[in-house]
Amino acid sequence: MNRITRALRHRNYRLFFGGQSISLIGTWITRIATSWLVYRLTGSELLLGVVGFCSQIPLLILAPIAGVLVDRWDRHRILVITQILSALQSAALAVLALTHVITVAEVIVLQLVQGVINSFDTPARQAFVVEMVADREDLPNAIALNSSMINASRIIGPSIGGLLIATVGEGWCFSVDAISYLAVIISLLMMRLTPAPRAHVDTHMLEELRTGWRYVAGFAPVRALLLIVALVGVMGMPYATLMPVIASKVLHGGPHTLGILMTASGIGALAGTLYLASRHTVVGLGKVIVAGTIALSFGLMAFSFSRSLWLSAILLAVVGAGIMVQAASVNTILQTVVDENLRGRVMAFYSVAIMGMQPIGSLLSGIVADRIGAEMTIFYGALFCLIGGIWFAMRRAMLAEHVRPIYIERGILPWDDGNLAPAPASNVEIRGE
């Protein structure tokens, strides 16, 4: 157990973990409430896709620029500001819903606002992990615990959200979320931080952005890792956007059914991240990425044909585990190989790949589901994910050879009289979040 939670021995990370855990429960309550509210008001799969698109499209556009600023500015201060703004956004949703004047147009506008906030919050939070964990050997564990925190909230949040929607309505869900942000704001303010040195920058912001782009586009392992998570973001993750349709039309349920499905996905994802947290090395995560991608693909295919709530829940647990294992493994590799002066920009591109591509997938899935149905939309998306997983598996050994010198330099792989101790290429893997 100590190996699984070793990053919690760092005080700042422990504070962040506690505060963020509470806040994320509120976030997932709001997510399920927003989906249900939009579907209740409209009954439209297309508008579900539009709302999902609007919530994340700002990240696709703004995150690369935000990544440059994250490398320049104080990441702690950025996080305090973004959490305060997020609390205000949830409070606005609560007021509109509780006064029964909320419309889909207002939901869309507020989702756009939250998307802008997340464009700065997400890369700052990813890059800030290294400042909270003094011992770099604990970094992979901290990243895995971050993912476990997210997925534990996915288990608790939708369950509470489904209960609140059924009993008191969506407005109280948004209110709980707004209050939950206080936990993470307080935890950030309680931290004791040594100001991280920031190199004086004379170059123009666009030049720094181009430097970051040249790095992620020109270094084959980083490029491949971002492509595989982007593919899942576009073709796999939109299943969550269509979940209210599956819950009501296919499984003939209501908010409780939606909560069960979302909770099942969270349980699987939590199991996956606990597995990653128990690992003592980043070596071997290339195979984990392949396994996670293939598992989520087959899980979604089977889910698209399921007409049983409990079978669907079991399959979504497999999907949740696959998605989170893949994403967390990719994150860990990127955090390990990237230089500190590029960290904010690289994590911004990671945020674009894993979250910024989802609005495209959400909009596309809404349009396609309007024509061929939610079930077949999920199936064909999973098929594309499977093809991507096979492609990555075929390139894994070659990508490992590119990463090997960095692992040697950073002491992850051993030396023998100045040379790398013999190790078959098949045993040297890329690592991830």
Image (cartoon, rainbow, N blue to C red):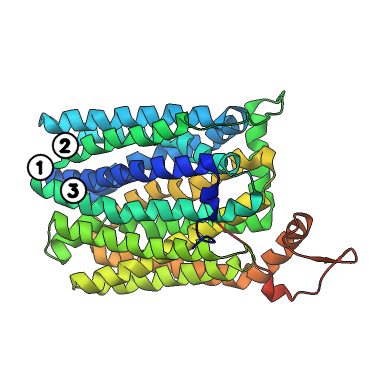
Q: Is residue 16 left or right of residue 342?
A: left
Q: Nearer the viewer, residue 130 or 223?
A: 130
- Mark 1 or mark 3: whose residue is earlier in sequence: 3
Q: Amino acid at mark 3?
A: Trp
The residue that disc 1 covers is 168
Q: Secondary structure at mark 1?
A: loop
Q: Secondary structure at mark 3?
A: helix
Tell me if I can see residue 278 in this picture.
yes
**Cα separation between marks 3 and 2:** 12 Å
The reply to whether dot 2 and dot 1 touch (C-beta < 8 Å) is yes
The residue that disc 3 covers is 36
Q: Which label lies toward us, 1 or 3? A: 1
Q: Name the residue: 31% across, 66% down.
A: 316
Q: Amino acid at mark 2?
A: Gly
From the top left corner, tell me how far across and down residue 148 is, in percent. Answer: 43, 56
The residue that disc 2 covers is 171
Q: Nearer the viewer, residue 330 or 141?
A: 141
Q: Which label lies toward us, 3 or 2? A: 2
Query: Which of the numbered marks, if any, corresponds to residue 153?
Result: none
